[in-house]
């Protein structure tokens, strides 16, 4: 039987099932739910007619109550409207669960853009070696950012997962119970979530989804593209912003940052523990079982009494590799693939799980930095010359480049100064406990000048990294003006001898973040995307000139209005004039649950991202934009910017 079109598959497996299961809501044994379910279609009809007649929302709602619920008091009317919202929220959850269950049927999991398709097309064209070479240096990093209003609480995520499983099996009894549970489960918390709560909500995805989907993708690449050989490159990794992103969020303190890093570490230990425990039941052989038991005990200690653990990543990995060799040598390689899969996960997640980025606004930094300089000079220290604040920007940059010494933290009483400086100390602590990968990047948002970068460069060295700066500094250019100035700022940095020396130690790689989200708010969708495209071309040119590999990190929101859209198509469309050895982008709020919330959707969308830039290279279609097309785009962008600005300022 031929495969039906995607829309038909969607209608059959999502839309039709939703209509069937939605009717169960009406039969749930809760009076309030039944009444709400009966009145909601009438309210919907009233809204539709009123909207078409050009009535305002107040009139539409009043019409509904006059016609169908005339005896209700004002308080009772408001209660019913709230119940409508609650009912619809639960319908959305049901729809999400049905969509999750049908994902592999609606989407072709082996189709264009998937790894299987990529591998087969490379094999058929004798380009498997090229593909291997590309994957040895290519990386994808999705960076999870918190928008607490945009994702479900953990209890609801659990229900969605269970509901999707029950729908796959058409288990009506379980579906009925889960819908009843959904009707009784609150969707809101009485208190605003703290940054730590937001982090815990997102760590749910790491623990229950990404640990498995990342592992599965990496295993496939190793087994099918590299014939089982070890790959030095981790290819895919997770960035993490809750607990590290303090831009505009005064509640993110150094203590919260340390607490989130600790939670990430505990969670990866928990996942390793589950895998080792499961494997121990299979690896019941001489010289193996005892070692697996010991690892199990060490991992248990690591996430229950973390202060007492002596387990290091090196020891954990070398034990697993030793056990693997014994199994191959003495036990006919029994269960070796499952053990290898765990070794691969240690390569992907280490003891850090997600890479915690720190972010702060350049203006907040400048205020802290200047307050710090004034205190240090007043204390009689010779770190800064007494006339530092009167110097030109260029002279200040020169002094900051060659800065030496350490600042005395007891000099400071200002809360903002202490928060900022102690955050830098926290990065050092996290690197010691979770490994350098755990927190090794500091993003400066709203970066406008070379001085903004060098102020952070100096602070990091003076506060925590006197001997060796193991932190990458990533300027974030957001507004249209900042994007135009970005190449000049970067050339200044590349030609600064001390900064160039720092880059060399970091593998001559420079992260530059570009704000699609704020750029879109500033310049409109087309202008922002075009300005970023051109900025990337200029930044690539200037970086290649100084033998630096530029890593572009795209700050994209979920919807197109915040710079989102068809992400993998965007990356597939970049030409040879833009550096593309690494794809990094933020994934925000609801986009996390909708695009990466289940094993299937997470694996599918990650594979699309991995293959987005590779196909062009393999097929030699990676051509630059023609000059005449550039002229057209310039005109369109200018026209759209003018229209957008006039509309925004109206």
Image (cartoon, helix red, strand yellow):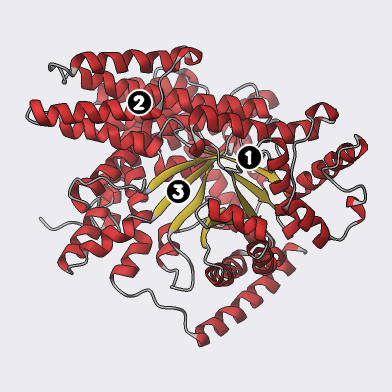
Mark 2 crowd level (few <14, some 14–19, many ≥20, 10 Å Cα): few
Q: Is residue 562 left or right of residue 348?
A: right
Report the front residue among 413 and 374.
374
> Which circle's residue, 3 or 2, is located before the other in the chain?
3
Mark 3 crowd level (few <14, some 14–19, many ≥20, 10 Å Cα): many
Q: Is residue 203 left or right of residue 210?
A: right
Residue under label 2: 315
Q: From the image, which quarter does the C terminus lie in?
A: bottom right
Instruction: Determine whether 37 is above or below 445 in the image.
Output: above
Seen at 44% across and 16% down, the residue is 309
The part of the image, by quadrant, that contains residue 174 is top left
> Which circle's residue, 2 or 1, is located before the other in the chain?
2
Q: Say how many tags the image has.
A: 3
Q: Position of residue 267 (x, y in %)?
A: 44, 25
Marks 1 and 3, how far apart at CA: 29 Å
Instruction: Determine whether 536 is above or below 305 in the image.
Output: below
Q: Position of residue 293 (x, y in %)?
A: 26, 13
Residue under label 1: 467
Mark 3 or 2: in front is 2
The part of the image, by quadrant, that contains residue 420 is top right
Q: Position of residue 423 (x, y in %)?
A: 68, 33
Residue contact at pointers 1 and 3, CB within 8 angstroms: no
Residue under label 3: 141
- The reply to whether residue 162 is visible in this rendering is no
Q: From the image, which quarter does the N terminus lie in?
A: bottom left
Helix, strand or loop at mark 1: loop
Instruction: Determine whether 564 is above or below 588 in the image.
Output: below
Mark 1 or 3: in front is 1
Residue contact at pointers 2 and 1, CB within 8 angstroms: no
Mark 2 or 1: in front is 1
């Amino acid at each position: 039987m031929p495969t039906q079109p995607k829309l038909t598959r969607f209608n059959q497996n999502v839309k039709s099932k939703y209509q069937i299961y939605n009717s169960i809501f009406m039969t749930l044994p809760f009076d309030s739910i039944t009444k709400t379910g009966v009145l909601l279609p009438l309210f919907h009809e009233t809204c539709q007619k009123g909207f078409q007649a050009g009535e305002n929302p107040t009139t539409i709602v009043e019409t509904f109550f006059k016609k169908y619920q005339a005896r209700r008091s004002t308080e009772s009317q408001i209660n019913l409207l709230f119940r409508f919202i609650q009912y619809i929220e639960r319908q959305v959850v049901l729809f999400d669960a049905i969509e999750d269950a049908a994902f592999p049927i609606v989407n072709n999991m082996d189709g264009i853009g998937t790894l299987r398709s990529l591998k087969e097309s490379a094999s058929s064209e004798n380009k498997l070696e090229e593909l291997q070479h590309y994957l040895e240096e290519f990386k994808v990093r999705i960076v999870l950012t918190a928008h607490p209003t945009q994702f479900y609480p953990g209890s609801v995520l659990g229900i969605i997962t269970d509901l999707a499983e029950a729908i796959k099996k058409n288990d009506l009894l379980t579906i009925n119970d889960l819908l009843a549970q959904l009707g009784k489960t609150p969707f809101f918390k009485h208190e605003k979530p703290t940054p730590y709560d937001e982090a815990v909500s997102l760590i749910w995805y790491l623990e229950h989804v990404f640990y498995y989907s990342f592992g599965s993708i990496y295993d496939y690449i190793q087994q099918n593209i590299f014939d089982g050989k070890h790959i030095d490159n981790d290819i895919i990794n997770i960035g993490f912003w809750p607990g590290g992103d303090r831009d505009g969020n005064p509640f993110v303190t150094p203590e919260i940052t340390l607490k989130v890093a600790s939670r990430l570490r505990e969670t990866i230990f928990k996942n390793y523990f589950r895998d080792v425990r499961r494997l121990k039941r299979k690896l019941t052989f001489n010289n193996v079982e005892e070692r697996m038991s010991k690892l199990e005990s060490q991992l248990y200690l690591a996430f229950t009494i973390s202060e007492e653990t002596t387990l290091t990543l090196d020891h954990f990995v070398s034990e697993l590799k030793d056990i693997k060799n014994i199994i191959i040598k003495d036990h006919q390689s029994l269960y070796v693939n499952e053990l290898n899969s765990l070794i691969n996960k240690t390569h992907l997640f280490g003891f850090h799980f997600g890479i915690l980025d720190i972010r702060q606004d350049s203006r907040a930094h400048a205020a802290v930095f200047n307050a710090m300089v004034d205190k240090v000079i007043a204390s009689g220290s010779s770190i800064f010359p007494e006339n530092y604040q009167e110097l030109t920007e260029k002279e200040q940059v020169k002094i900051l480049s060659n800065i030496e010494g350490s600042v005395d933290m007891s000099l400071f009483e200002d809360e903002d100064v202490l928060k900022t400086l102690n955050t830098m100390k926290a990065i050092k602590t996290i690197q010691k406990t979770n490994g350098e990968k755990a927190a090794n990047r500091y993003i400066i948002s709203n970066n406008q000048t070379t001085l903004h970068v060098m102020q952070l460069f100096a602070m990091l060295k003076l506060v925590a990294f006197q001997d060796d700066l193991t932190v990458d500094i990533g300027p974030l250019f957001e507004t249209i003006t900042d994007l135009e100035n970005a190449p000049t700022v970067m050339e200044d940095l590349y030609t600064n001898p001390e900064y160039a020396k720092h880059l060399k130690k970091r593998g001559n790689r420079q992260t530059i973040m570009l704000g699609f989200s704020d750029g879109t708010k500033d310049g409109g969708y087309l202008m922002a995307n075009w300005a970023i495209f051109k900025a990337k071309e200029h930044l690539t040119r200037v970086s290649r000139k100084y033998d630096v590999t530029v890593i572009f990190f795209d700050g994209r929101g979920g919807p197109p209005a915040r710079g989102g859209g068809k992400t993998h198509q965007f990356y597939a469309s970049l030409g040879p004039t833009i550096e593309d050895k690494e794809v990094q982008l933020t994934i925000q709020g609801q986009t996390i649950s909708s695009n990466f919330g289940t094993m299937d959707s997470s694996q599918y969308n990650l594979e699309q991202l991995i293959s987005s830039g590779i196909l062009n290279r393999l097929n030699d279609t990676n051509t630059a934009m023609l000059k005449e097309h550039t002229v057209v785009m310039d005109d369109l962008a200018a026209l759209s910017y003018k229209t957008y600005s006039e509309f925004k300022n109206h």
